[in-house]
Amino acid sequence: MLSLTYLLLSRTYGMHLYTADLAQAVLDAGGAAQLVTARGYPAHVYDARVQVHAMWPGGGGTMATGPLVRGGVGRVLEAVRQARPDVVHITGPQLLAPLIMRRLRARRPGGPGIPVVHTIHDLDPHPGASYGRALHLWNRAVIGQADRILVHGEIYRGQLLSRGVSPERIVVLPLLHLFLGHAAMEGLARAGVSAETEPCALFFGRVARYKGVDILLRAWAALKERPPDWRLIVAGLGDREAEPAEPLPSGVERRNRLVDDAEALDLFRRCSVLVLPYTGASQSALIPAAYYCQMPVIATRSGALPEYVVEGETGWLVPENDPGALAQALREALSDPQRCRAMGRAGRVWYDAQRERERAGLLALYQEMAKRGR
């Protein structure tokens, strides 16, 4: 029986959704999954069968060094030793991860160390981030220690190869987790998706500068003589510097708050199209979430986003920082509900096929790594 230990030494909600989804694949295949994480993690996103060790001290900050002096690294290593996993998968960033990986790979007395997979979500910082040089140095350290590096776009395989990483160490799988906790996912699977939608475009998630909400609002304002029932909903907490300074255009609703599972699911079932006007993005799990709910997407040609959109079939691709092109895609989507529904159905077909590929690839990765560690 395959046994995985996941290390996520933060409380970042999206990273826990991602980790819970990976663990679910192992559980569904008859394996065992453990989680070593920070205190105060969002427990409801995990299947109850995941064995959790929440002992990482401090607030779970990505750049926190305090756990080193408070014995956090030693506690992590002891928890892994007791779990006796075949493979360790570090699923999110933490400053001390390279040190932990080095210790894990030399941990098994009289035999090989424990094989370690590390996901790298961002090879480059988002525009405007203050941690650019630190991220590049940290990525270099992670790449030097991990047995396998998991990324979620072919564009990042190319970048890693250009940096001298050997091809056998790079694994590319689609990013397909949704935005719901475990219980809500089970409810969605039972209820299905709605067949009726409204002429409403949706921006969902944290409003940060690189998310391009300012471009989206300019595009919406450029939709002259739009029907009065067309709406744009911008839902999610916003960074202060990314919030619009001017009054919102007519037809725009701003929900500046944490959106719970029930409200998020209602939005994804009722709105016609999801909009990702990002600049300098890496990838987004919101695209597969939209496809799961049979909703097409409008996305920019940023990072790996084009790898997740079949243009003209599951959605629209537009250039970054182009309000005119974005406005045209919004007009096409909201003025043709029949086409939107057809694209949404095609998106669900894409999702189901990619999900099968992702699950098979993930389990093959873990099994291959487990054999190397024995």
Image (tube, helix red, strand yellow):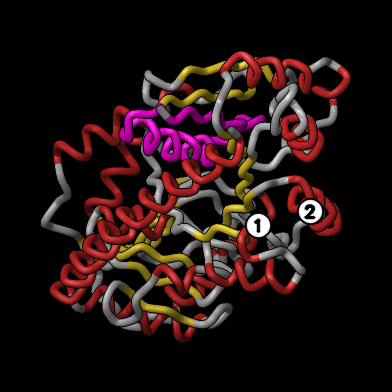
- Residue 55 among magenta residues: no
Q: Amino acid at mark 2?
A: Leu
Residue at the right extreme? 69
Q: Which mark is residue 23?
A: none
Residue 314 seen in render = yes
**Residue sitting at x 84%, y 30%:** 65
Give the image location of residue 268, x and y in percent. Answer: 29, 51
**Residue sitting at x 79%, y 36%:** 102
Give the image location of residue 245, x and y in percent. Answer: 62, 60
Query: Which mark sits nearer the N-terminus, 1 or 2?
Result: 1
- The answer to whether the residues at label 1 and label 2 have Cβ atoms under 8 Å apart is yes
Front in this rendered view, residue 174 or 67? 174
Left or right: residue 259 compared with residue 267: right
Give the image location of residue 364, x and y in percent. Answer: 43, 48
Residue beneath disc 2: 135
Left or right: residue 143 compared with residue 1: right
Q: Quadrant of the N terminus?
A: top left
Range drawn in magenta = 2-31
Task: Report helix, strand or loop for mark 1.
Answer: loop
Residue beneath disc 1: 122
Task: Report helix, strand or loop for mark 2.
Answer: helix
